[in-house]
Amino acid sequence: MDIFGVVTFLGGLALFFYGMCLMEECLVKFAGGKLERMLERLTASPFQGVLVGTVMTALIQSSSAVTVMVVGLVDSGMMSL
């Protein structure tokens, strides 16, 4: 791997982390209490949480995107693991 590949990789990683931080801030600002209450209701039991995660992954068709959203929601304090 040459220097251009390393710089490209680091730039992509930086953009990914910036997007995660931006998503977290926007979730807290715009969704706030409503989204938190809805997530609490939908994931009241572990079975419901797995079911909601499976359905969301099927709808979005990207487990990576769902994982990123879950990490953002947990990081913002809207959801607990």
Image (tube, rainbow, N blue to C red):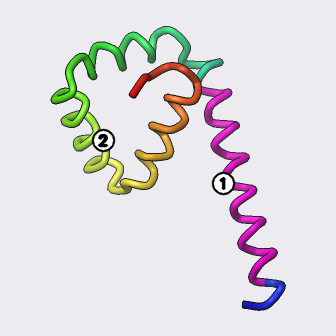
At mark 1, the secondary structure is: helix
Taking the spot 50% from the left edge, 45% from the top edge, the residue there is 68
Query: Which span is picked out in magenta?
Result: 5-27
**Residue positioned 33% across, 56% down in the render:** 61
Magenta stretch: dominant secondary structure = helix
Crowdedness of circle 2 by 10 Å Cα count: few (<14), some, many (20+)? Answer: some
- Quarter residue 10 falls in: bottom right
What is the x, y in percent for residue 41? 28, 13
Q: Residue 47: within the magenta?
A: no
Residue 32 position (above or below residue 2)? above
Residue 53 sits above or below residue 43 on the image: below
Q: Is residue 21 above or below residue 7?
A: above
Circle number at residue 56:
2
Kindly identify the amino acid type of the residue bearing the numbered disc 2. Met
Looking at the picture, tell me which residue is in the foreground, 49 or 31.
Answer: 49
Measured in 3D between alpha carbons, the distance from the residue under mark 2 to the one under mark 1, in whole angstroms, is: 21 Å
Which amino acid, by three-letter code, is at mark 1? Phe
Residue 22 in the figure: left or right of residue 32: right
Relative image position of residue 80 (x, y in whole percent): 42, 23
Mark 2 lies on a secondary structure that is helix
What residue appears at the point 39 percent right and 28 percent down from the top-left corner? 81
Q: Image quarter for residue 76?
A: top right
The residue that disc 1 covers is 16
Please give left or right for residue 13 compared with residue 49 in the image. Answer: right
Left or right for 11, reference 52: right
Residue 42 position in % (x across, y down): 27, 20
Point out the tag, 2 or 1, that comes first from the N-terminus: 1
